[in-house]
Amino acid sequence: MLCVSLLTWQLSITNPKLCFYIAYYDCHICERNNNVSFFDSMLYVSWSSETRVYYLSLEFYMGRTLQNTMINLGLQNACDEAIYQVRIRKYLQPLRHLHTLHCSGGACFLDSLATLGLAAYGYGIRYEFGIFNQKISSGWQVEEADDWLRYGNPWEKARPEYMLPVHFYGRVEHTEEGPKWVDTQVVLAMPYDTPVPGYKNNTVNTMRLWSAKAPNDFQLQKFNVGDYIQAVLDRNLAENISRVLYPNDNFFEGKELRLKQEYFVVAATLQDIIRRFKSSKFGCRDPVRTSYESFPDKVAIQLNDTHPALAIPELMRILVDVEKVSWEKAWEITSKTCAYTNHTVLPEALERWPVYMFEKLLPRHLEIIYEINHRHLDRIAALYPGDNERLRRMSLIEEGDPKRINMAHLCVVGSHAVNGVARIHSEIVKSTVFKDFHDVEPEKFQNKTNGITPRRWLLLCNPGLADIIAEKIGEEFMTDLFQLKKLLDYIDNEVFIRDVAKVKQENKQKLAAYLEKEYKVKINPESIFDIQVKRIHEYKRQLLNCLHIITYYNRIKKEPNKKFVPRTIMIGGKAAPGYHMAKMIIKLITSVAAVVNNDPVVGDRLKVIFLENYRVSLAEKVIPAADLSEQISTAGTEASGTGNMKFMLNGALTIGTMDGANVEMAEEAGEENLFIFGMRVDDVEAMDRKGYNAQEYYDRLPELRQVMDQIRTGFFSPQKPELFKDIVNMLMNHDRFKVFADYEAYISCQEKVNELYKNPKEWTKKVIRNIAASGKFSSDRTISEYAREIWGVEPSAVKIPPPNEPRD
């Protein structure tokens, strides 16, 4: 614990916004009993007049925490030196592996919110079990529980004094005083706080995650009839709410436990937000404010996808039923407070909850949603008289058996801003998914292209590259990534070109050694490291990659004496446990790998590795070593992607379609500096109108026909020749994502990759152009846009002085 206590000690000296951290571990001063420490009061001074931003998400993949924290506090060198001095260097690496949840968009955003000096909180669920650990057994994915809390989490602090009740089930009574939700079951929400430090600015924000606890009187009736043992066992029913993270697989399942999770986080968070809003000063829990007029000026709630959509009816319930605000005023406050980020255009991913489930679980919220819908449709009917089809399309309630609540429509109607996460995605949102809503309120719709934090995704994971960049342009790029444009001045600098290539080769050698140890496959570090890492899904088209692998294999086998550019192709990602096709895709990749890697004719010219259990800590090894980044989804299906940005920043060239953020990456770097291929969105739409016929491509392209015949006849599964019949059937007869339509262009583009790789100097110059163009894709830029254009707050570059320095 030396590192942890050293870190805590250093933080307590230099970070006035870390009062909660200091209080927990050093002074034991907290917000209870109205005790306000010196640090509390300084925090209050800096935040009391600001809008507080609340980022609600059902998942924060935070990655390992210790090293990231040391970097942001400017302590890494000091810690390394201290550890060296006391001769416990061998313990540092394991300590760096201390983590919270297994950095996705949400985690990058929390890092940037703190770095930009914004008063912000991340709210989510403290899952007992995170996203499953993936094991590959006989080529198949097997899921294992991720018991990440088994040894505790040194970074979190339980806050039992802020435990809050969350209600479920029950019924609604309409009384003279107004509606009352009665006879409910109560689950307690216990908050756990984790500090999120900004980069060298002495600002630390909080991520608060809720854990479900059963109250002592849970299932009281069973206690009363003497069934004590069963009553205690039934406490698990309440605590299951925060037991496990549902994998985000772009497929809506509609499980009651998931709906409970969504309401649980929203209900607890809104109580916390309102308590904080009402308090007169930081650290005081006495409610002082009674008017909600200023609520939207003090509170900004960002709904990350539709999962926290229940914040809208829940805030209405609190304002109308509890605080006795009129409906009209409550709706004005709610819609001005909430903003919604859309993350997908795939229809199967949109949340549509059955009305009967709401009726049972959240009866009052169902009434509120019906009233929101009634008023919404009255407004639309007045704007478009007699257009019943438009009313049907725009309704929050979808008729059918069963009736369903469209949560995306609820988010759009109840928010003052709606944004997509890449320019092309935001345009698709406006022109298709929410076209009717955009027609009515075009000013509501915005774009906020995603970004990544350069602190984790360059400085932490690729220190060698960060160092040679800093030597040329200084260190300011860490908080202003646009500074990377200055690297264009060194595009013809022989020393810099050589240094960039050297760092890449060192990273490749490290990864090759790791892969050889883990997978017992000898890797050629001189080969192209061709990498596709992301969730396994048909629209991401790992199958297209697989078809190229087999095509390349067949070409080597056909001309074994020809000189081929060597490749190591790595594919990684998890399939949702219930997603049959995704699991079959993994099995196909591992089966192809088994044939290719053991063919002596092929040798080290082609190796295929499925990266087991892809996660943040593995990404930190893989991304810095990549030569080629595969971003090959069907145009119009990927909202943005962030992996594409991480690879670009770390010096990989992109082979990709004009989809998601690839479009803006090509715009920033110049399309000639990426390997762009395939259909554009307009081409896909035209093909949809005309009809996609996979058979045409199969008949016309001999190499494709050979590949498909090999898969169909069991070349890669001799023990079970029909093993991949579902994949073949899907590709030939009902492939929504048109793999064959882009096959020819993809193979041709891969040949261009090989040609360029033969010229290392020109390859590296393209790499430098890509790194220099990646400034736009910092999450600092993304969050600055959210702050100014949605939340109405201004980021600050001010570094808060530590308590031992005088303040103005």
Image: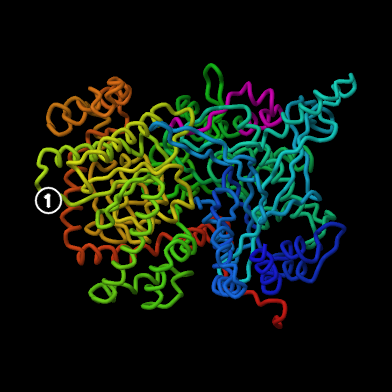
Q: Is residue 742 visible?
A: no
Give the residue furthest to the top.
Answer: 401
Q: Which of the pair 797/316 is nearer the observer? A: 797
Judged left or right of residue 526, residue 218 is right
Q: Which of the pair 403/692 is nearer the observer? A: 692
Question: What amino acid is found at the position of numbered circle 1 in the picture?
Answer: Lys
Judged left or right of residue 16, residue 412 is left
- Helix, strand or loop for the magenta stretch, by majority: helix
Which residue is depicted at the point 14% across and 34% down?
703
User: Residue 604 at what x, y percent from top left?
Assistant: 23, 48
Q: Quadrant of residue 722?
A: top left
Is 293 drawn above or below residue 690 in the view shown?
below
Q: Which of the pair 745/401 is nearer the observer? A: 745
Which residue is depicted at the point 67% across and 49% down?
152
Which residue is depicted at the point 56% across and 24% down?
404
Q: Is residue 176 visible?
A: yes
Quarter of the picture holding the N terminus = bottom right
Is 100 drawn above or below residue 197 in the view shown?
above
Is 589 drawn above or below residue 668 in the view shown?
above
Q: What element does badge 1 sit on?
A: loop
Q: Which residues are magenta?
A: 347-372
Q: Which of the pair 642/378 is nearer the observer? A: 642
Question: Disc 1 designates what residue?
Answer: 563
Q: Quadrant of residue 347?
A: top left
Residue 322 sits inside the magenta stretch: no
Residue 363 sits inside the magenta stretch: yes
